[in-house]
Image (spheres, rainbow, N blue to C red):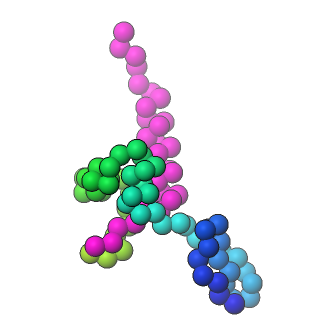
C-alpha cells in the first residue's frame, strides 16, 4: 500500500513499512520563517548563502531539515562574537 505525502513527514510504502521523508518548503514559507521578503530569499539562493533544491527552471524548494540545520549553524556562529565596548 502506498499513501500520499502527509504533513507529518511520514508516508507508508508497500508492506506497511514507514519511511521518513523531508518536507519541502516554498520560497514564501522560508521568507516567513526568516522574517525577510521572498526577493531576499531569492537573493540568498543566487549568492549560494542558503541551501535550496531547484526542482525545475521555475520551481525552487527548500528541505525543512536543511533550513533548520542552516539556522542552527548561523546562530552558533553568532555566539562566538566579541562585544565591542
Taking depth in this image into account, of 70 and 9 the one nearest to the observer is 9
**In terms of depth relative to the viewer, which is nearer, 57 or 17?**
57
Residue 4, image x, y percentages: 60, 82
Residue 78 place in picture, x, y as percent: 43, 31
| Residue 47 picture location, percent across and down | 25, 53
In the rendered image, the vertical position of residue 73 relative to residue 5, given as above or below: above
Compared to residue 7, the image places residue 34 above or below, namely above
Q: Is residue 60 above or below residue 74?
A: below
Rendered residue at 35%/46% (across/down): 36
Q: Quadrant of the C terminus?
A: top left
The residue positioned 43% from the left and 40% from the top of the image is: 74
Instruction: Decide if residue 3 is in sight here.
Output: yes
Quadrant containing the N terminus in the rendered view? bottom right
Query: How far across and how far down the image is residue 77, in percent?
Result: 43, 35
Position of 34 relative to 28 (above/below): above
Magenta stretch containing residue 67, yes or no?
A: yes
- Name which quarter of the figure residue 19 lies in: bottom right
Q: Residue furthest right?
A: 16
40 displayed left or right of 74 = left
Residue 83 lies left or right of residue 3; in this view the side is left
Report the span colored magenta: 58-85
Residue 84: in magenta span: yes
Quarter of the image for residue 48 reads bottom left
Q: How many numbered discs sit on the rendered protein?
A: 0
Can you see residue 48?
Answer: no
Please give the name of the residue rendered at 68% of the width and 80% of the height, measured from the top-left corner.
12
- Residue ID at (47%, 37%): 75
Q: With 61 as the anchor, is 47 left or right in this view? A: left
Amino acid at each position: 500500500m502506498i499513501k500520499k505525502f502527509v504533513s507529518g513527514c511520514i508516508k507508508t510504502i508497500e508492506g506497511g513499512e514507514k519511511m521518513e521523508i523531508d518536507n519541502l518548503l516554498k520560497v514564501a514559507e522560508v521568507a516567513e520563517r526568516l522574517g525577510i521578503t521572498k526577493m531576499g530569499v531569492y537573493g540568498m539562493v543566487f549568492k549560494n548563502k542558503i541551501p535550496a533544491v531547484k526542482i525545475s527552471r521555475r520551481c525552487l524548494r527548500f528541505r525543512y531539515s536543511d533550513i533548520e540545520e542552516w539556522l542552527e549553524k548561523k546562530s552558533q556562529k553568532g555566539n562566538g562574537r566579541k562585544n565591542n565596548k
